[in-house]
Image: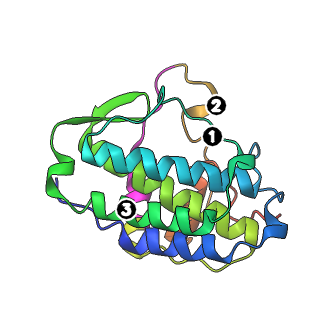
């Protein structure tokens, strides 16, 4: 598998992170269970997890996802921006795509882990942009790769809620790719806080 250039997407999300105001941390997001602070904590955790996944290094702790926006410490904007940068750099290494790797508690082919990581960054970037009213341009290639991944994902038989993304939201076929990605991952492209 060819390497994926995460840098446009991670740079776009890092810019969003730096633009979040403190008074927005308790605001809702398109992820119904997450506030803005929770979403930032999730982005922080997934950035670390998928950086370690690219490096084939274990995640500290039990690897189970845990989201809690109250954990945002002083300097969270710089920490998360740095983790996003490290994520992009880790997936620039062709060796990151070899064999299998752990993504949190799940083992998967490394190339699939890269696509999951990219999708997580791009889609949650969209969530953060919508929740905080910021413009978002993660790069056409990243959006199209994430869209192909999301549209091609087959939920296991009997998966609750349509799989990891939830039930798709219908979006017109001629809609922009980022709107189609939002719909494919269970989000309403017209969502506002």
- In the picture, measured across the screen, residue 42 lies left or right of residue 141, that is right
| Cα–Cα span, label 3 and label 2 | 32 Å
Callout 2–callout 1 Cβ contact below 8 Å: yes
Q: Residues within 10 Å of mark 3 (few under 14, many from 20)?
A: some
Which callout, 3 or 2, points at the residue further toward the start of the chain? 3
| Cα–Cα span, label 2 and label 1 | 6 Å
In the rendered image, residue 107, in percent from the top left (x then y), is placed at 33, 29
Please indicate, yes or no, whether residue 172 appears anywhere in the rendered image.
no
> Residue at 56% of width from left, 54% of height from top?
43
| Magenta segment | 143-157
User: Depth check: 180 or 49 in front?
Assistant: 49
Q: Is residue 147 one of those drawn in magenta?
A: yes
Secondary structure under tag 3 reads helix
Q: Residues within 10 Å of mark 2 (few under 14, many from 20)?
A: few
Which callout, 3 or 1, points at the residue further toward the start of the chain? 3
- In the picture, measured across the screen, residue 81 lies left or right of residue 167, that is left
Q: Nearer the viewer, mark 3 or mark 1?
A: 3
Location of residue 189 with respect to 32 vertically, above or below: below
Which callout, 2 or 1, points at the residue further toward the start of the chain? 2
- The residue tagged 2 is 161
What is the number of the mark on residue 86? 3
- The residue tagged 1 is 167
Q: Is residue 28 one of those drawn in magenta?
A: no
Location of residue 183 with respect to 161 vertically, above or below: below
> Residue at 37% of width from left, 59% of height from top?
87
In this picture the colour scheme is: rainbow
């Amino acid at each position: 598998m060819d390497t994926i250039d995460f840098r446009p997407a991670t740079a776009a999300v890092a810019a969003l992170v730096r633009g979040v105001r403190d008074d927005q941390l308790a605001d809702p997001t398109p992820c119904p269970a997450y506030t803005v602070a929770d979403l930032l904590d999730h982005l922080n955790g997934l950035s670390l997890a998928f950086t370690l996944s690219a490096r084939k290094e274990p995640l500290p702790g039990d690897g189970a996802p845990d989201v809690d926006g109250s954990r945002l410490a002083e300097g969270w904007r710089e920490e998360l921006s740095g983790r996003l940068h490290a994520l992009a750099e880790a997936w620039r290494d062709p060796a990151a795509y070899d064999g299998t790797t752990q993504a949190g508690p799940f083992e998967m082919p490394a190339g699939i882990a890269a696509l999951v990581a990219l999708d997580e960054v791009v889609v949650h970037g969209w969530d953060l942009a919508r929740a905080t009213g910021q413009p978002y341009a993660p790069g056409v290639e990243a959006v199209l790769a994430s869209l192909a991944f999301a549209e091609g994902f087959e939920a296991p038989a009997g998966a609750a809620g349509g799989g990891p993304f939830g039930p798709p939201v219908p979006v017109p076929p001629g809609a922009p790719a980022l709107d189609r990605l939002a719909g494919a991952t269970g989000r309403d492209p017209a969502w506002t806080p």
